[in-house]
Structures are given as structure tokens and as C-alpha cells.
Amino acid sequence: MSSNQPTPVVPYLSVRDGMKAIAFYEAAFGAERADVYEFEGKVGHAALKLNGGALYLADEFPEHEAMTGNVAPPTLGGRTTTTVNLNVDDAKAWFDRAVKAGCEPIREVTEEFFGAHGKVRDPFGHVWSLVTLKG
């Protein structure tokens, strides 16, 4: 794939307070802003560069759910239906940085058959797996 091709699969998160979410993902996961577009006074779409890949997010628009197809975890009672998996060079260091930035630890980093693995929940309700694969 050439460098000007889009990433084939990109997580797209629905959040409340998109600008705070962007700032949080910058601090917790080292994300970099690529594009941010406003819609009705909120983040209508944001593209972030994250760990060699991409992450998209937007503020939830419950009034447009029929068009967007999703809402933020708080609207679902704090639950989410997916986990964002990050394959990283040092799961423990990424886990510690995320917790320091404000993520809630779900599962401390442990050694598994496939490598080191830990899970956190960010302040916006999304779950992240931080994984360093063996070999």
C-alpha cells in the first residue's frame, strides 16, 4: 500500500466532548491531530494519527443517530461494544502512561501466551487493549 492510501480499517469512536477526547488521546496514547471538523458546534469528525495507524472520532449526535448509527458510551449506560487494540513496543509503559493520564485500569499488564497484555477504560467510556506481541 502506498503512503497516500488510507488505513484499511480505522476505529471510529463516538464521544461526548470531542475536543477534550482529542486532548486526552494525545496525552494518554501519543495521538497527533490530522484533521478536525466542526458540526453544529461540536466535533463532527476528527482524524488522529496513532501508533502508526489512525483513529477517527466525533461527538455523539443522538438526534442524528439514524444517520450516524452510534452514540457515545455514556448514552449506553457507560458501556461500549468494542475494544480498541493497540499493538505497542512496551505494553507496560503504554499502560502506565494511559493510567497516569486518567484511564481506569481494567486489567494490569500480564504475560500471556501471545505477549504482554493490559486493558484500560478511558474517561469517555472506551476500552483499550495494550499489547506487546512476542517475537
Image (tube, grey):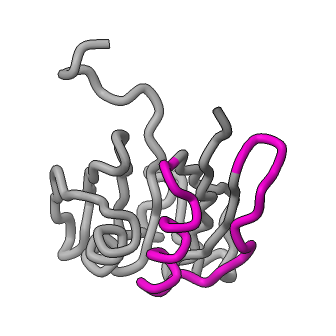
Segment colored magenta: 88-115
On-image quarter of the C terminus? top right
> Left or right of 76: which side holds 63?
left
**Vertical side of 40 occupied by 10: above or below:** above
Camera-nearest residue between 12 and 70 = 12
Image quadrant assignment for residue 106: bottom right
Q: Residue furthest top?
A: 1
Count of numbered circles in the view: 0
Q: Residue 64, percent across and down?
A: 42, 61
Q: Residue 118, percent across and down?
A: 68, 64
Camera-nearest residue between 41 and 113 = 113
Residue at 41% over, 78% down: 16
Q: Residue 22, percent across and down?
A: 29, 70
Q: Residue 89, percent across and down?
A: 48, 49
> Left or right of 43: which side holds 7?
right
Q: Is residue 114 magenta?
A: yes
